[in-house]
């Protein structure tokens, strides 16, 4: 690595972390102001509040990574252009493409760190953050769905008329075993109760019917333990649940939802694709940021920087719009998530052709 590479890379990474600290500080102050009444209402101590923000800070810092990388790129590049450093570098025989290398190296380092954090480290912190918010910030969750059908095995299907997530009791329960489109057995119960001590369900006032050809065997009882692929977690709040899974956990959960035939899989698929897409967004915005702020003009570089920020803002709107379309199932989730990156890659390449060498 040449001296000029170390010089640019150091300035770029320093600016990036400076921008992250400033923006995260501002966001935390605003967030604290908004949630202060909830903290007072629940009489939370300083330790509990600090514990929450220890999980909130890395989450929000990673969340704003693409835009902070872009701001750092614009800040460093425009400052170098204003001090004629870029002109000096290009005049010395270094090509514009070569000058971009340390910027892209820095963006790649940040992108790789973001991917590792999002995929494997942050979900554990998000578990604490989300649990804190559902307990103290959000209104108490109440499961209100009725007539719940769940596939709990290759040939087993469970039904509940209602479920109370406060008492962990389901009413009018049935469990059917169907093979080759034929009903082989059916268990019904007036209710099922979750036994947290043994981690299984207890059926109350149950009746079991087994079909053997033309014969039917019926057994009844007052209470019976049963183990099925269903837990109270499946009836709990899904508030930011996708953010609490590591990548392997997210893959397993998506497979579980597909097995059950759930209709909310799209949310978790989008989350998976975003974790792969977001690091590339940082690299693409860095590329555009260098191009838009590397020129020095008599009127200053303000116009080009403003255009660059406008492009970054459009990128964010584009991503939000495409994500909403995917959630509405009007577009493939992987295409919707990657479409902004694809479009802005071509925009960046077009702008690159206009840069004087």
Image (cartoon, rainbow, N blue to C red):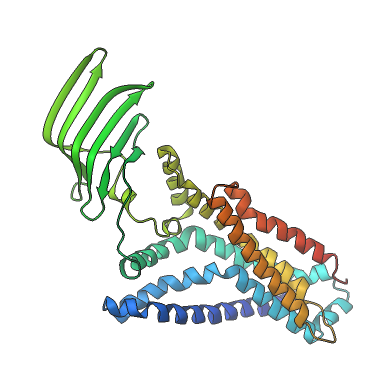
The quadrant in which the N terminus is found is bottom right
Q: Is residue 330 left or right of residue 99?
A: left
The picture quadrant where one finds residue 343 is bottom right
The picture quadrant where one finds residue 22 is bottom right
Q: Which x, y percent locates residue 211?
A: 25, 19
Residue in the foreground of this view, choosing between 194 and 12: 194
Residue 112, compared with residue 47, is above or below; it is above
The quadrant in which the C terminus is found is bottom right
Residue drawn at (82%, 82%) of the image: 296
Q: Is residue 344 left or right of residue 119?
A: right
Q: Count the labels in the image.
A: 0
Q: Which x, y percent locates residue 259?
A: 42, 38
Specify whether residue 144 is in view. yes
Residue in the foreground of this view, choosing between 135 and 92: 135
Residue 14, compared with residue 110, is above or below; it is below
Q: Is residue 232 left or right of residue 71?
A: left
């Amino acid at each position: 690595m040449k001296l000029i590479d170390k010089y640019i890379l150091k300035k770029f990474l320093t600016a990036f972390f400076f921008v992250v600290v400033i923006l995260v500080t501002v966001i935390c102050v605003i967030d604290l102001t908004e949630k202060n009444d909830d903290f007072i209402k629940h009489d939370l101590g300083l330790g509990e509040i600090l514990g929450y923000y220890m999980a909130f800070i890395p989450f929000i810092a990673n969340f704003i990574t693409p835009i902070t990388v872009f701001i750092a790129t614009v800040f460093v590049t425009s400052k170098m252009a204003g001090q004629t450093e870029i002109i000096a570098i290009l005049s010395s025989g270094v090509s514009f493409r070569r000058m971009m290398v340390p910027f892209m190296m820095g963006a790649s380092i940040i992108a790789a760190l973001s991917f590792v954090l999002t995929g494997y480290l942050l979900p554990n912190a998000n578990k604490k953050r989300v649990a804190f918010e559902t307990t103290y910030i959000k209104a108490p969750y109440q499961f209100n769905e009725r007539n719940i059908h769940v596939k709990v095995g290759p040939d087993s299907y469970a039904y509940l008329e209602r479920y109370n997530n406060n008492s962990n009791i389901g009413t009018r329960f049935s469990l059917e075993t169907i093979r080759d489109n034929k009903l082989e057995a059916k268990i019904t119960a007036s209710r099922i109760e979750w036994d947290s001590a043994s981690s299984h369900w207890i059926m109350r006032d149950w009746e079991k019917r087994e079909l053997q050809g033309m014969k039917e065997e019926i057994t009844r009882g007052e209470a019976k333990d049963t183990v099925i692929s269903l837990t109270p977690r499946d009836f709990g709040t899904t508030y930011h649940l996708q953010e609490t899974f590591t990548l392997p956990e997210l893959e397993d959960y998506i497979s579980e939802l597909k097995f059950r035939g759930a209709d909310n899989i799209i949310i978790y698929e989008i989350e998976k694709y975003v974790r792969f897409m977001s690091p590339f967004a940082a690299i693409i915005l860095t590329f555009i940021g260098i191009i838009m702020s590397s020129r020095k003009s008599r009127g200053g570089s303000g116009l080009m920087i403003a255009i660059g920020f406008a492009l970054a803002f459009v990128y964010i709107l584009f991503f939000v719009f495409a994500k909403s379309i995917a959630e509405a199932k009007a577009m493939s989730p992987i295409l919707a998530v990657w479409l902004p990156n694809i479009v802005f890659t071509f925009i960046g390449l077009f702008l690159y052709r206009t840069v004087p060498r």
